[in-house]
Image: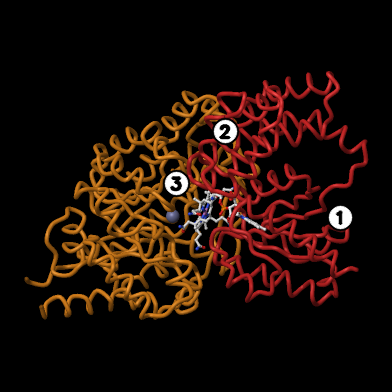
Chain colours: A red, B orange
Amino acid sequence: MFEHEGLSKEFEFVTKESEIKHIGNSIQNTSLKMQTIAFALIQGDQDTVGELTKECLEEGISANEILDNGLLNGMSIVGVKFRDNIIFVPEVLISARAMKAGMAHIEPILSESGIEPQGKVLMGTVKGDLHDIGKNLCIMMLRGAGFTVYDLGVDTSPEDFADGFEEYQPDVIGMSALLTTTMPNMGRTIQYFEDIGLRDDVRLMVGGAPVTQEFADEMGADAYGESAVDAVEKAKELIVLLKDLRD
Amino acid sequence: MKTMTKKERVFNALNRQEVDRPPVANPTSVATVEMMDLVDAPFPEACRSAELNARLAATEITEFDFDAIAPYFSIIQESSAIGCDMQWEQKDNWPTVRMSNPIWQGSSDVKVPKDFLEHKDTKVIIDSIKILRKEFGNDIPIIGKTMGPWTLAYHVFGVEKFLLGTIDNPSETKLALEKLKEFTYLFGEAQIDAGADILTVPDHATGDLVSGQYYKTFLQELHTEMAENFKVPLILHICGRTVDRMPAISETGMHAFHFDSKNKPEEAMNAVQNKIALVGNINNPETLYSKNTIEVKKEVFDCLNAGVQIIAPECAIPLKTKSENLIAITEGVSDWLSEHNKN
Ligand code: B12
Ligand SMILES: [Zn+2]
C-alpha cells in the first residue's frame, strides 16, 4: 500500500469508502519521512514526532508540508479509530501529546509566515458543566485542521462566551455539554447573544454526548456535531455560511 | 407466592433467586428537584446535612414506592473529605470536583487523612444511614455507596493526567489504585456499621473512555478482592458502553452490575451468562428526562422480558426528571406482571 509498512497496517482501520479515498489520497504520494511522522503520531511516540519534525524543518521541508503530509495524516487515522471504538481516550491523549511535540516546532513558523488560518473558533464547556475531555479532543482536531482555537475551559457562562467573543472575534463558537442539567445553558447562551445583538456576527455550534440534532435545532444552534471529526466539518461549513452572510 | 418484604425481594434478586415481583431501585441516585421542593431538602445542603440527606433519600420509598433507599446522591463525598477542590453548585446541578486542579501527582502522594471518616462530607452519609435505619426498620434495604479506586483517581489526579499515566507507566497506575482502594474499604465498612445492607461501588472504567482490556488489566482483581472482603452484597456501577467487559465483571463475585442504556438488556444478559445479577437500564437523558410514562414503561418491559433482575434508571437520574416518570417504573413492573400472570 504505502511505503511505510506500519502506516499501511494502520490504514486498514479506515473502512468507510469516502475516508479511504480521502485519507488514502492524502498519504499516497508522501515521502517515507512524512509517513514515519504520521505513524509515530498514531503510536503516540512524542519523541520521534518532535525529533523528525525538527529534522525535516532543518532539511528545508516546509512547515505546511510536515503539517499536512505528516502530522495531520496521522491525526486523521487517530480520529477515525477513536470514533469507531478501535482506540480509546488514553490512546488519543498520547497521540495528542505527540501532535503537540510536532506543533511546538511548526507553530512559530506558521504564525511568522502569516498564512491565513482556516478561521477562528472559540470553544467552551457550558456553565455548571466540568466535562472537558470531548471538548479538548475537538479543539485538538480543529487546531490540527488549521483553525485558530481559543479555549474558555469549563463552566463557561453566557457572559463569558460574550466576553470571549469581544476579545477574540471568532467566526464560530462551539459549546460542549455532557449533562442534561447543563444542556439548556447552550440555549441560554444563544438567547444571550440575541439579547446583546451579536447573534448575527457569529455562528454557534453545539455538541456533547446528550445533545442531539433535534435539541440543537430547538435551541436555535447553527450546527450540531457528533464527534471531533464532525466538529471540523461543521466548523468549515459554518465559516462558508458566515462568509456568504457577511458578503 | 407470598408477598415479600422489600428487603427479601431485593436480596433474592441480587442472588438471582425467585421473587414475588421484580424489585425497582436506583443504586446511584433518585434525587430530583421536585422532591427537593416537596421535602424542603435542596442541593447542595442535602449532600451536606444528614437530616436533609435522609429526608430526600426517603422519597425513594414514600413517593416512588421503590424497593430500596440509596442516600448517597453524588460521587464526590469522599473526594471532598480527602481535600479536593470542590464546586458545590446549587439546587439544579450536581456538586462536583474541580479536576483541573488536582491535589495529588502520583501514588506516593496518596494518604488517608486522619479525619477521613469524621469529615463533614463522609459523616453525612454515615449519619443519614443511621437515621434511615431507625426510621424504616429492617425490612427496607439501604444501599450505601463507596467510590472505587478508578473513580477516585479521576478526582485526585485529574482525568486526563491519570489516563495518560495508564500508558506511560501502568505499574505506577496499579500502585495508585492499590493505595486508593483503602478509601473504598474505609468508607464502605463505615456505612455497613451504620446499617447499610448493600453497597454500590461506582468505578467508571467506561467504554466511553477506556477499552475492555483496561478493566481486566487494572480492575478485575481489585473488584474480586472487594467482593471477597465486604460482608454485604456489592453492586458495581459503570456507565456508558460496557458489554465488552461484562464477561470479566461477571467473574468478580460481585452480586450485581448496574448497567447503562448504551447496552441493550438482552445483549447484557447474554454477556453475563447468569453469573451476576443485572440492575438497569432505563435511559436517563432521553426517556426519563424528556419522554412520557408510556415510553418509560416500554423500557421497563424490555428489561423484564430480557430477565434483568432489578429494574432501575441507568445512573444518577437527571435532577429535573418528572416524578410521574419515576412512578411509571414501578407501575410498569405491575403492568408487566399482570400481563404475565394472565398468560
Ligand atoms: C468522564 C466522565 C466524567 C468525568 C469528567 C472528566 C472531565 N474532565 O471531563 C468526571 C468523573 C469528573 C465526571 C463528573 C460528573 N459526571 Co460524568 N461522565 C463522564 C463519562 C464517563 C464520559 C464523558 C466523556 O468524557 N466521554 C468521552 C468524550 C470523548 O466524549 P464526548 O464528551 O461525548 O465528546 C465527543 C462528542 O460528544 C463531541 N463533542 C463534545 N463536545 C462537543 C462540542 C462541539 C461544539 C461539537 C461539535 C462536538 C462535541 O466530540 C467529542 C469527541 O468525539 C460520561 C458517561 C458517558 N457515557 O458519556 C459521564 C456522564 C456525562 N457524567 C454524568 C454525571 C451525572 C456526572 C456527575 C454529575 C456525577 C456526580 N454525581 O458528581 C459529575 C458532574 C460534574 C460536572 N458538574 O460537570 C452523567 C450525566 C447524566 C445526565 N444525563 O445528565 C453521564 C452521562 C454518566 C451517566 N450515564 O449518567 N464525569
Ligand atoms: Zn454512572
Kind of residue at disc 3: Gly
**Residue mark closest to the camera, 2 vs 3:** 3
Residue B252 image point, x, y percent: 27, 39
Label pair 2/3, CB-CB below 8 angstroms = no
The residue to which callout 1 is attached is A168
Q: How crowded is mark 3: few (under 14 residues within 10 Å), some or many (20 or more)?
A: many
The residue to which callout 2 is attached is B164
- Chain to which the residue tagged by mark 3 belongs: B
- Chain to which the residue tagged by mark 1 belongs: A
The residue to which callout 3 is attached is B207
Residue at x 34%, y 51% (from the top left corner): B200
Instruction: Check the picture and name the quadrant holding the C terminus of chain A.
Output: bottom right
Residue A225 sits above or below residue B204 on the image: below
Kind of residue at disc 2: Leu
Residue at x 54%, y 32% (from the top left corner): A10
Q: Rounded to the nearest whole Å, what is the CA distance between mark 1 and mark 3?
A: 36 Å
